[in-house]
């Protein structure tokens, strides 16, 4: 009787032991959920930006969009009692982050304005392979062969969608490629940014970078700004709100889990982007695009299932 009582006293639920002994897996799961949430919001932001870019110069769109996001994050930082002029803002990682943000935003918005939303979103899905490679080289994150295999399969899915042959690949698609490289560099720099900088501070300077991109392109482009209609203002407001929320969710994802674990869930943006392209802009994906999407999503789900062992 005493031995049975002792066994009962020492017994613990198996799930509790599993969760407690795997905090890294739990962090990766949480980070993955934040990443998917960010991708939904980014897809809506893309749709709003594409809609307003059809009627106004890209430089103007970037300026208004960046100003709105900067004001929003500045207000959040003030509520949180965070200093916008924190000395860590001048760190090397933040400087690199701003440069990549300018490149990524400028070229991606140009791609949204000049190419279909679905194809632009599809090209952006090449970012995970760039980020994971950078994480392995710069941060020494361990990436097993199974995870590499799943990520490469996901990239193959993107290539199935694009079919980059001489006949079907548009030179304008290079705009999205350059934007993708910019975003990948931004995400890696965000990982290296000083931990003293909150999400609101990172968001503020991210949108300041968008303002810089707008000013630079406006000077180069030389197009006069046009009067914003109520419809355009609503589109821009929606882009700012979705973009700010997505930005905050993305920063949480990149800082909670391993970069190599949460980054592949950027692939979910592909589904949302294609769906919005069909609903809002009348784009019609063909069978090859659908097959590529399935490959991309299954690779991301496999990475989540395998966790750190991949």
Image (spheres, rainbow, N blue to C red):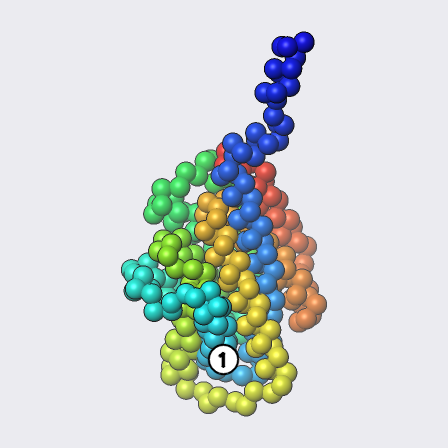
Q: Residue furthest front?
A: 2
Residue at screen point 51% across, 61% down = 248
Q: Nearer the viewer, residue 161 or 245?
A: 245
**SS class, disc 1:** helix
Within-10-Å neighbours for mark 1: few <14, some 14–19, many 20+: some
Residue at the spot of label 1 = 64
Residue 310 in sight in this render: no
Q: Is residue 76 above or below residue 272?
A: below
- Residue 164: horizontal and vertical position, in percent? 52, 57
Q: Nearer the viewer, residue 172 or 17?
A: 17
Residue at screen point 70% across, 67% down = 279
**Numbered-mark total:** 1
- Residue 285: horizontal and vertical position, in percent? 66, 61
Q: Is residue 7 above or below residue 147?
A: above
Residue at screen point 59% across, 38% down = 305
- Which image quadrant: the N terminus? top right
- Residue 190: horizontal and vertical position, in percent? 40, 57
């Amino acid at each position: 009787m005493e031995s049975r009582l002792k066994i009962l006293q020492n017994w613990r639920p198996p799930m509790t032991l599993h969760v407690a002994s795997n905090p890294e897996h739990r962090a990766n799961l949480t980070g993955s959920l934040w990443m998917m949430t960010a991708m939904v919001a980014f897809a809506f932001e893309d749709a709003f930006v594409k809609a307003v870019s059809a009627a106004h110069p890209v430089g103007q769109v970037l300026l208004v969009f960046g100003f709105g996001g900067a004001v929003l994050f500045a207000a959040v930082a003030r509520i949180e009692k965070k200093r916008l002029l924190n000395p860590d803002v001048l760190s090397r990682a933040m400087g690199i982050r701003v440069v990549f943000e300018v490149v990524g935003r400028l070229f991606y918005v140009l791609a949204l304005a000049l190419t279909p939303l679905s194809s632009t979103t599809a090209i952006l899905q090449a970012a995970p392979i760039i980020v994971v490679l950078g994480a392995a080289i710069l941060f020494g994150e361990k990436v097993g062969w199974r995870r590499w295999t799943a990520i490469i399969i996901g990239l193959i899915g993107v290539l199935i969608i694009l079919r980059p042959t001489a006949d079907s690949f548009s030179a304008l698609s290079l705009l999205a490629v350059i934007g993708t490289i910019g975003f990948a560099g931004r995400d890696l720099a965000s990982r290296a940014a000083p931990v003293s900088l909150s999400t609101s501070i990172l968001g503020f300077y991210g949108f300041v970078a968008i303002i810089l991109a707008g000013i630079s392109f406006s000077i180069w482009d030389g197009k006069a700004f046009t009067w914003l209609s109520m419809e355009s203002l609503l589109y821009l407001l929606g882009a700012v709100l979705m973009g700010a929320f997505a930005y905050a969710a993305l920063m949480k994802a990149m800082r909670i889990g391993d970069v190599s674990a949460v980054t592949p869930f950027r692939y979910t943006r592909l589904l949302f982007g294609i769906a919005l392209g069909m609903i809002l802009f009348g784009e019609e994906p063909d069978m090859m695009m659908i097959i590529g999407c399935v490959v991309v999503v299954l690779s991301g789900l496999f990475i989540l299932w395998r966790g750190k062992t991949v």
